[in-house]
Each structure stands twice: as structure tokens, then as C-alpha cells.
Amino acid sequence: MSELTDTTILIAASWPPEAEDSNFKAKFEEATVYLSTSLVEMGAQVVYGGNLAQDGLTETLASPFSDQWPDKPVFVHVLDEPSLVHAGFDRVWGALQRRNTGAIATWACVNDTFGYLSIDGGRISVAPVDDKPILFSRRTFPSNLSIPDDAAKLSYARSNKVERVDACLALGGKTGLLGNDRDHYFGFFPGVAEELLGVFEGRKPVIPLGAYGGCGLAIAEALGLVNTTSDTSPRQSGYFEAMNRLGKLRQDIPDNVRDDLAKVASAPLNQETMGIISSIIRNWSRPERKTHFGYLTA
């Protein structure tokens, strides 16, 4: 299958609050892996922005591609600056060593630089597209944020992801429940919502997969794709602002894909759902691209 060739798709995903249930967590993890591998089989390049924590999704999503040798990266991992600093030199080095086939590209934000990460001798290189690489040894690797504002740095990374993709699929994600510390998000808005908002405001296809709970379900509700629940639980303020912004954009969904969006918004991921997702992305009315950029190596 190659219906999504030359299409770069952002998967906006993280553990939803429902993942505290081990059965749901396994279901969610299986769904995200199925989604990313299916998109690559359709010819797409997948982008994901997660941390390098051992209990995170990043390595789970990247591992199916670790033994492939494609002409260009099929899976792109974007590290925001807080995640890069928290991971430290050795963990980042280890991840880069495992990603040595060309199938997985790693990009990161450092200060005001967004560049391709690689190993250069005994150092880690951050290479912007249009500038000289920055080289870090273990001694000079960033140990603190360039500015003491996690939210601004997270938004910077998310805006860079959004700029280079053609579509966004959202599932799971934090919703900022004040009564659940594990559901607290970092940043101005929930990450899944902020990434999808950026893509949608760029008039590009967005597909919330509400069957997997969390912020993805809230987005589907805000866009009028599924019935709205009466949940009025107190949450972090950015959650409500994000949902209000999405609600105002629901009229921007093209009429020719609205019914299909509603179908996948509550459907489990399977072969039929993937076919509908592909159709939505291909048929979404949007400005014609002059060129396809996507993510290559520097």
C-alpha cells in the first residue's frame, strides 16, 4: 500500500487517565503501535514527540522500525528541551546508538535551535537544516533549561513538529484533572490538544480517535464528532481554553470528510478504520502544497 506516500503524519499521543487500569493501558499501547506501523505500511512518515522515560511510549513506538533500512526515515522522534535535559547525555547517546539503520530519525530542541541529533565521534551533534551543527560532550551537554519556562519550551517543540507535518492523529493524552496527579499535563495546554490545534489552525487534516479516552476523546467532543459527556470535573485551566478554541473551529471541518471523521472518532483501530483514516487525509480540502518537506536527516 502506498496511498500516503510523501505524507508526514504527527501522532499526538500520551497515556490517558484511563491507562491507570492495566488492561486499558495494554489496549492503548497496542493501538498506538498498530497506528504507527499501519501508517508506515501505507507509505507515510510518522512523527512522535515523546520523552525517553522507561515507562513512556517512545521506545515502544520506535522499536518496530529499528531493523528496517529505508531510503529515508519512516519514524521521527522529536525531543523537546525539557525531555532532552531530563534524559541526560548517556540516555540520549544510548537511544541514538540503537537508532542506527536510518529508519528512525531523532530531532531535538536546544535553546532556540531545532536540529537533527546524531553521534559525532564522542559527542552528540544537533544539526539545524540551515546552520552549522552544535556539538555536545558529556561535560557540555545541557543540564538546565535555556530559560526557566517549561511551558514555553514545550510549545516551541510542538510548533516545530506542527510546521513540518501534513496531518495529525490524536489519541489518549492528559486532561488536567485536578484530583489526579497522574493526569496533570505540562505546558500551556495539554500536549495532545496543543499539537492537534496547531495542525488544524494550519488548515491541515486532524483526526481525533476518541475510543482511546483522554484528551483525544475530549477533542472529538469539542469538534462535535461524538456525543458530549456531562463531565464537569475541575481541571487545569489550559484544558478548557484548548477545548473552547477547538469548539470554535468545528465549522472548519470540510463537509466531504465530516461523516468519516465521526465514524473513526468512536471506532477502534483496525484495517477498516485505517482505510477511512487514509481517505480522510487524502480528501481533506486544503491548500495545495508546493513542495513536501517532512523530516530527513540534516
Image (cartoon, helix red, strand yellow):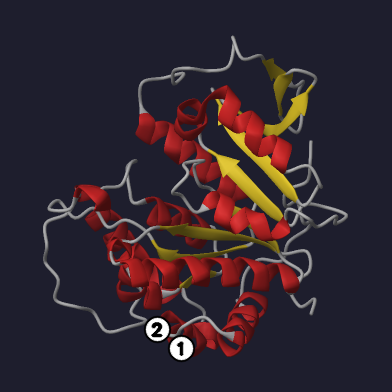
- Depth check: 72 or 237 in front? 72
Q: Tell me which corner region of the image, top left, top right, bottom left or bottom right, holds residue 248.
A: bottom left
Q: Residue at x 47, y 90 (%)?
A: 259
- Depth check: 258 or 144 in front? 144
Q: Residue at x 54, y 58 (%)?
A: 202
* Location of mark 1 (residue): 263
* Location of mark 2 (residue): 266
- Depth check: 104 or 2 in front? 104
| Helix, strand or loop for disc 2 | loop
Crowd around label 1: few <14 · some 14–19 · many ≥20 (10 Å): some
Crowd around label 2: few <14 · some 14–19 · many ≥20 (10 Å): some
| Furthest residue in direction right, as rendered | 71
Residue 74: percent from left, percent from top: 74, 57
Cα–Cα gap, marks 1 and 2: 6 Å
Left or right, 28 with respect to 98, comes to left
| Helix, strand or loop for disc 1 | helix
Q: Residue at x 60, y 81 (%)?
A: 274
Q: Is residue 202 above or below residue 238?
A: below
Total label count? Answer: 2
| Furthest residue in direction top, as rendered | 139
Residue 120: percent from left, percent from top: 78, 23
| Residue 107 appears anywhere in the view | yes
Left or right, 69 with respect to 62, comes to right
| Tags 1 and 2 touching, CB below 8 Å | yes
Q: Residue at x 39, y 83 (%)?
A: 266
Quadrant the C terminus occupies: top right
Residue 27: percent from left, percent from top: 43, 73
Quadrant the N terminus occupies: bottom right
Q: Is residue 124 above or below residue 156?
A: above
